[in-house]
Image (cartoon, grey):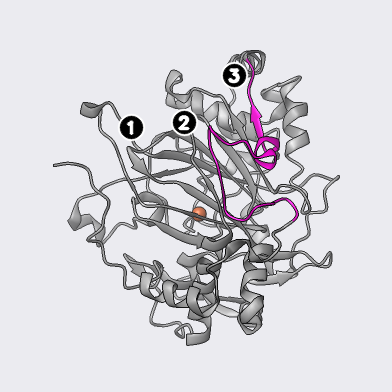
Amino acid sequence: MAPHAETQFIDSSGYTPSTDVITELKRKLRLHHPASVPGASWISKGSQTIDSRDTDTDGEASILQLSLSDLKEIEDAFLFFNATKLPLNKLQAEHFPLPTLSIKIRELSILPPDKQPYFLIRGLKPQWFSKYKNVAIYAGIASHVSTKRAFAVGDHNVLHHVTNIEIPCEKEEKIYRGPANRNLAVPFHTDYGAILSLYILSRPATGGDFYLADIHDIASQIARTRPDILETLRQPFVMVNPNVEGGRDDRPLLFTLPSGQFAIQASRTRLFGTACRPRPSSLPPLSAKQLEALDALHAAGQAVARRFEFRSGDMMFFNNLKMMHARDAFVDGNEEENTTKRYLLRLILKGERNDVNWELPPELNQIWEELYNHADEEEIFTVHPELFSFKASH
Ligand SMILES: [Fe+2]
């Protein structure tokens, strides 16, 4: 049977917003003209695409195209790390020396609020490497962006596999298989943490494009007609706390930082649950206003987003307190047709550079403790594909 997207998959949890609801919200919020309000300073033309044909100067500034000497430096760094015989969880920049490339990465990895809050490293050929080598190269390059990787309480995996993993129907009842391990579209949301990174090992046959939307642009769009929605987002939401059976977290999703910048932390799985694990009935339901506000984030995100046609080998890093992300549904390829699966690796890093003011809303202090306050040796790198746990889901 030909591969297919899970079009027949019904999600009644609310994680996946209804197309009719989003269409109606776009009409109410007058989101038909995405370029009608000024975008964030780093974005100049509203909804845009970055791909091989991109000629936009903002886009080019955010891409570090690896040269042959950069690739040689990465190869040498891998050999250096291999010779240390250290486990992956001990991999830090000193074990993966990139004498000249590190400087280029550091220039991009500032991710300042008033500049482009993301960058792409392009030019790796993951198909040439073993799975282990891809993981070591990814963690090695990421260690030049940040020394601290995140994990979830009770789930010490730091490396996550974003790819469609089918499991037998009878197991779906017992094993969590969240949006990251399906091929459905994923609405605008954030993961948990400061810097989200993705390494694209391979692309699907069709679909799967990735989107980033700046919370400044989303909020500007919403504020034109419905500033009350922003107020709703600034009030506490009751969320699932996966660390405790029946646990809950009460906190806002949208924050205004002392600098005046917005910050957002809005994981839809913690709000709605997912199709296979809906929000527990022991928690109070989300109010109609809260549901509308969450879907407005998605509707406005679609209006202002920049679309990325990832290439295999792309490594992306972005400010996850500032940028919401989404993806299209996709259809994986197969070996018979010489096409590949969509397969991304994820690491979540900490914004920790002294020369950058990484402001954090106090309401997120406890979560940051849980994500980052651990020793490297507690981290687990699962090199081969494994399902996301609910704790690590987004
Ligand atoms: Fe995500």
| 250 horizontally vs 244: left or right | right
Name which residue type carries label 2.
Answer: Ser
Q: Are marks 2 and 1 in contact (CB under 8 Å)?
A: yes
Name which residue type carries label 1.
Answer: Thr
Query: Compared with residue 141, is residue 178 higher up or lower down, i.e. above or below?
Result: below
What residue sits right under mark 1 in the picture?
Answer: 340
Q: Earlier in the sequence, mark 2 or mark 3?
A: 3
Is 57 part of what is drawn in magenta? yes
Name which residue type carries label 3.
Answer: Phe
| Badge 1 element | loop
Q: Which mark is residue 312?
A: 2
**In whole angstroms, how far apart are the C-alphas of marks 2 and 1?**
10 Å
- Tell me if mark 1 has few (under 14), some (14-19) or many (20+) residues whose alpha carbon lies within 10 angstroms of its own: some
Residue that protrudes farthest toward the left in the picture: 1
Does the numbered disc 2 mark a residue whose Cβ is under 8 Å from ligand 1? no
Q: Which mark is residue 226?
A: none
Instruction: Report if residue 235 is visible in the image.
Output: no
**In whole angstroms, how far apart are the C-alphas of marks 1 and 3?**
26 Å
Q: Nearer the viewer, residue 314 or 349?
A: 314
Q: Nearer the viewer, residue 53 or 301?
A: 53
Q: Earlier in the sequence, mark 2 or mark 1?
A: 2
Q: Earlier in the sequence, mark 1 or mark 3?
A: 3
Q: Which stretch is magenta?
A: 41-67
| Badge 2 element | loop
Q: Which mark is residue 78?
A: 3
Residue that protrudes farthest toward the right in the picture: 355
Q: Are marks 2 and 3 in contact (CB under 8 Å)?
A: no
| Badge 3 element | helix
Measuring 72% from the left and 58% from the top, which residue is drawn there? 40
Is 195 part of what is drawn in magenta? no
Query: Compared with residue 213, is residue 58 higher up or lower down, i.e. above or below?
Result: above
